[in-house]
């Protein structure tokens, strides 16, 4: 057992614990905070895999931006301590069905991968160089050009949607 | 490579320790004279009314959404900034298209008054 | 990996934290003295020579203050919030190089905690984490003023974070690297502030808002928010917020000096590496004076104007600056003509003037329209 495997196992435990904490917190703000912790743990996973760029982007975008929005929304609605009220009737069976599918899929992937190799390998020392980052960037902006441009359309749609929704709310209030 | 991040992790621990020690010092040496008055929310000496946390204007939500969108743009911009010399004019064009599409939304938000703060 | 490395990391982390803590203590003294001078007063001069012991007296006073934890707060988060504010302000400095390296008893000691290739991205991620301390302080206080103050301050911080990020992009474009040490080395010939003065200016303005300094100091807005997000805090917990603000001022000045003012570079720094921190210190002192000067001179900006200034002026301007820089460098590269490179500062300043004209027109229209 090498030290990286131990780190990996400890981090996995933290990730699972924070995920469970998010699910079972009564207070929505605490749930959001557990999710932030979870995102940070995932970022550390990326670091272990030798992907510092992804790790830092994960913190900046997920932990730093999206969760701030979540917190704002919770505070906006004053929804910290909402009681579970009239859940949709079809929600429960659908959730169970979806989680079964997810479970099967994850098990299948795990088993399929297990045949090749399931070891945590130490990343290359060369990964802390500018060249590795530059290679990644060049791949992103040449090979994955179309997804990159489509992202901007996605962002545009989100922006227009947010503006429309909040304006409508304001018009109703007046 | 991980060594550098362990160094950062150690510093995070040290900083957290310092912060907790500072709080602990205050708790240890400060006097404690609790009273009912001190327990009430501070509202400039008036008697507090209503709940502490109340609903906030929806504008803050809009700001947060716009922030996410532009933050993602910045995150894309960062790797582009180290590779644009290799990507050449084509790379510049890529980025211009990306930004122009985003700017359409920005102009829309501006025209709809979403950036206004009454 | 042997145990001496762990010792080195712990010592380095601790020393850097200690430097920032001392820096915070003496920055308060520096600020009070400088403000006093500007307002033709004397400032604190009783405790010790020239009042140099004043920060220590303040610290002792804060330790012996009663620390209230009112009954209506969410206790865990209430205690966590100041910690969450202070830790990022300290950790931010981990990737800032104070110098190159020096030899201590045959061991090469580098003058930075970590040399990572995603240094700049690390800064943005830590800066984005710093927002939580303030949101949570406002929320956990369970007080409407604190809540409103917290949300306002955090909305302000995230708005200006975009400008900050785009200014980072400008520095990366110029330095051709995300590593802060590479960026400093790239400035051996010429500081980036010469090529991109507007970029440095925008960065500086954004940092003022980011650390909630005057003229963007909403948390200090006594009249409307009774001190904002830290209204319910007292004693050492309040001191931690105070500490975080000043440490962020120092660190962010260090970053600005590193990205645009040559960092630890100066004469003879290659021969005597220990001169590096001294040069950086001198640059930071000058930049900090700028911040204090602004506080002494400018009134607070109203919140609505602050937000529209960030979104309507600074964001497009910083985007334009990044593009102008990239285009200039590319054209100079492709056409092999240095003229394009030197058009960067000129075009940038024109962009700045356009922005200033826009603000001027807007302000004139507003003053004619209302009032």
Image: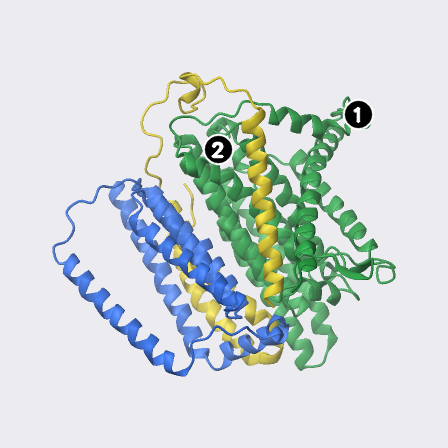
Where does the N terminus of chain C fall, quadrant-wise? bottom right
The single residue placed furthest to the front in the displayed view is: A1
Colour green, chain: C
Colour yellow, chain: B
Q: Secondary structure at mark 2?
A: helix
Whole-percent x, y for residue C231 in the image: 48, 29
Colour blue, chain: A
> Where, by quadrant of the figure, is residue A134 drawn?
bottom right
Please state if A29 lies on the left or on the right of C237 as rendered.
Answer: left
Q: Which of the chains bears the disc numbered 2?
A: C
Q: Secondary structure at mark 1?
A: loop
Residue at image position (53%, 70%) is: A50
Please state if C258 lies on the left or on the right of A25 as rendered.
Answer: right
Whole-percent x, y for residue B95 in the image: 51, 72
- The crowd level at tag 2 (other Cα within 10 Å; few <14, some 14-19, many 20+) is many
Whole-percent x, y for residue A167 in the image: 31, 50
Q: Which of the chains bears the disc numbered 1?
A: C
Looking at the image, can residue C192 be seen?
yes
Residue at image position (70%, 66%) is: C182
Mark 1 / mark 2, whichever is N-terminal: 1
Disc sitting over residue C48 in the figure: 1
Q: How many marks?
A: 2
Query: Label 2 near label 1: C-beta < 8 Å?
Result: no
User: Of A110 and C191, which appears nearest the observer?
Assistant: A110
Disc sitting over residue C228 in the figure: 2
> Where, by quadrant of the figure, is residue C64 drawn?
top right
- Please tell me whether mark 1 or mark 2 is closer to you in this view: 1
- The crowd level at tag 1 (other Cα within 10 Å; few <14, some 14-19, many 20+) is few
Do callouts 1 and 2 point to residues on the same chain? yes
Whole-percent x, y for residue C367 in the image: 51, 38
The answer for how far apart the CA atoms under marks 1 and 2 are is: 34 Å
Looking at the image, can residue C304 be seen?
no
């Amino acid at each position: 057992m090498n030290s990286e495997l131990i780190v990996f196992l400890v981090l996995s435990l933290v990730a699972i614990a924070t995920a469970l904490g998010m699910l079972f917190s009564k207070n929505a703000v605490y749930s959001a905070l557990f999710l932030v912790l979870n995102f940070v743990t995932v970022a550390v996973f990326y670091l272990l895999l030798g992907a510092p760029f992804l790790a830092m982007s994960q913190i900046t975008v997920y932990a730093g931006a999206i969760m701030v929005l979540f917190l704002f929304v919770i505070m906006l609605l004053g929804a910290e301590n909402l009681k579970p009220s009239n859940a949709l009737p079809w929600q429960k069976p659908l959730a169970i069905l979806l989680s079964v599918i997810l479970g099967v899929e994850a098990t299948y992937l795990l088993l399929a991968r297990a045949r090749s190799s399931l070891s945590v390998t130490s990343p290359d020392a060369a990964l802390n160089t500018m060249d590795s980052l530059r290679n990644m960037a060049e791949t992103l902006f040449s090979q994955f050009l179309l997804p990159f441009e489509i992202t901007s359309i996605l962002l545009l749609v989100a922006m227009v949607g947010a503006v429309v929704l909040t304006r409508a709310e304001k018009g109703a209030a007046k | 490579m991980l060594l550098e991040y362990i160094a950062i992790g150690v510093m995070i621990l040290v900083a957290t320790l310092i912060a907790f020690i500072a709080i602990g010092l205050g708790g240890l040496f400060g006097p404690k004279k609790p009273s009912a008055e001190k327990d009430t929310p501070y509202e400039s000496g008036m008697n507090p009314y209503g709940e502490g946390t109340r609903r906030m204007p929806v504008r803050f939500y809009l700001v947060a959404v716009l922030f996410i969108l532009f933050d993602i743009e910045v995150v894309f911009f960062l790797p582009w900034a180290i590779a644009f010399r290799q990507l050449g004019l084509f790379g510049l064009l890529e980025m211009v298209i990306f930004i122009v599409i985003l700017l359409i939304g920005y102009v829309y938000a501006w025209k709809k008054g979403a950036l206004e703060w009454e | 990996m042997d145990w001496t490395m762990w010792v080195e990391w712990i010592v380095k982390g601790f020393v850097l934290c200690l430097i920032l803590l001392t820096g915070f203590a003496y920055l308060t003294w520096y600020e009070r003295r400088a403000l006093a001078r500007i307002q033709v007063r004397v400032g604190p001069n009783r405790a010790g020579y020239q009042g140099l012991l004043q920060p220590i007296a303040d610290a002792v006073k804060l330790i012996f203050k009663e620390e209230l934890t009112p009954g209506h707060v969410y206790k865990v988060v209430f205690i966590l919030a100041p910690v969450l504010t202070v830790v990022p302000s300290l950790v931010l400095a981990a990737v800032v190089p104070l110098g190159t390296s020096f030899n201590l008893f045959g061991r090469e000691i580098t003058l930075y905690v970590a040399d990572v290739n995603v240094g700049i991205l690390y800064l943005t991620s830590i800066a984005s984490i710093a927002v939580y301390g303030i949101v949570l302080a406002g929320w956990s206080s369970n007080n409407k003023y604190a809540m409103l103050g917290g949300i306002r301050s955090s909305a302000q911080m995230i708005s200006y974070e975009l400008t900050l990020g785009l200014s980072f992009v400008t520095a990366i474009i110029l330095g051709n690297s995300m590593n802060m040490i590479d960026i400093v080395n790239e400035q051996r010939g010429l500081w980036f502030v010469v090529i991109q003065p507007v970029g440095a200016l925008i960065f500086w303005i954004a940092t003022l808002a980011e650390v909630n300094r005057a003229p963007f100091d909403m948390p200090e807005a006594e009249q409307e928010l009774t001190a904002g997000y830290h209204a319910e805090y007292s004693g050492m917990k309040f001191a931690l917020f105070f500490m975080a603000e000043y440490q962020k001022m120092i660190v962010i000045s260090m970053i600005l000096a590193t990205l645009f003012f040559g960092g630890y570079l100066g004469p003879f720094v290659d021969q005597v590496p220990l001169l590096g921190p001294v040069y950086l210190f001198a640059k930071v002192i000058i930049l900090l004076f700028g911040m204090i000067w602004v506080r002494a001179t400018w009134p607070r900006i109203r919140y609505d104007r602050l937000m529209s200034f960030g979104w309507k002026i600074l964001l497009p301007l910083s985007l334009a600056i990044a593009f102008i820089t990239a285009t200039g460098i590319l054209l100079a590269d492709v056409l092999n003509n240095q003229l394009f490179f030197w058009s960067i500062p000129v075009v940038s300043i024109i962009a700045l003037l356009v922005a200033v004209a826009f603000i001027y027109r807007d302000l004139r229209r507003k003053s004619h329209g209302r009032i």
